[in-house]
Image (tube, rainbow, N blue to C red):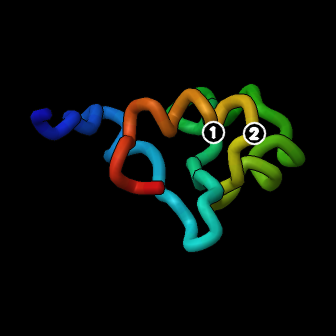
Amino acid sequence: MPKMKTKSSVKKRFKVTATGKVKVGAAGKRHGMIKRSNKFIRDARGTMVLSEPDTKIIKKYMPYSF
């Protein structure tokens, strides 16, 4: 059976931790910061861990990372 391909867009956007959780950057920070609250900008800083249902979806696209 041939190897499965990893989705290129997924490998650019997500990283997998050593425990198998998926890290992702916060959404909504590309432009339009003037209309966002300071609280939103602070909370969206850095990376966050995806929820379990979303992790299941990402695992289908990254077959060799888990």
Q: Which residue is mark 1?
A: 55
Q: Is residue 45 above or below residue 35?
A: below
Location of residue 18 in the rendering, given as x and y in whole percent from the top left corner = 56, 73
Location of residue 26 in the rendering, given as x and y in whole percent from the top left corner = 64, 43
Location of residue 28 in the rendering, given as x and y in whole percent from the top left corner = 63, 31
What residue appears at the point 38 percent right and 41 percent down from the top-left corner?
62
Quadrant in which the N terminus is drawn: top left
Camera-nearest residue between 1 and 54: 1
In the picture, measured across the screen, residue 6 lies left or right of residue 35, that is left
Which secondary structure, mark 1? helix
Camera-nearest residue between 64 and 25: 64
Q: Is residue 45 above or below residue 28?
A: below
Q: Amino acid at mark 2?
A: Glu
What residue appears at the point 51 percent right and 35 percent down from the top-left corner?
58
In the picture, measured across the screen, residue 58 lies left or right of residue 47, that is left
Location of residue 27 in the rendering, given as x and y in whole percent from the top left corner = 62, 35
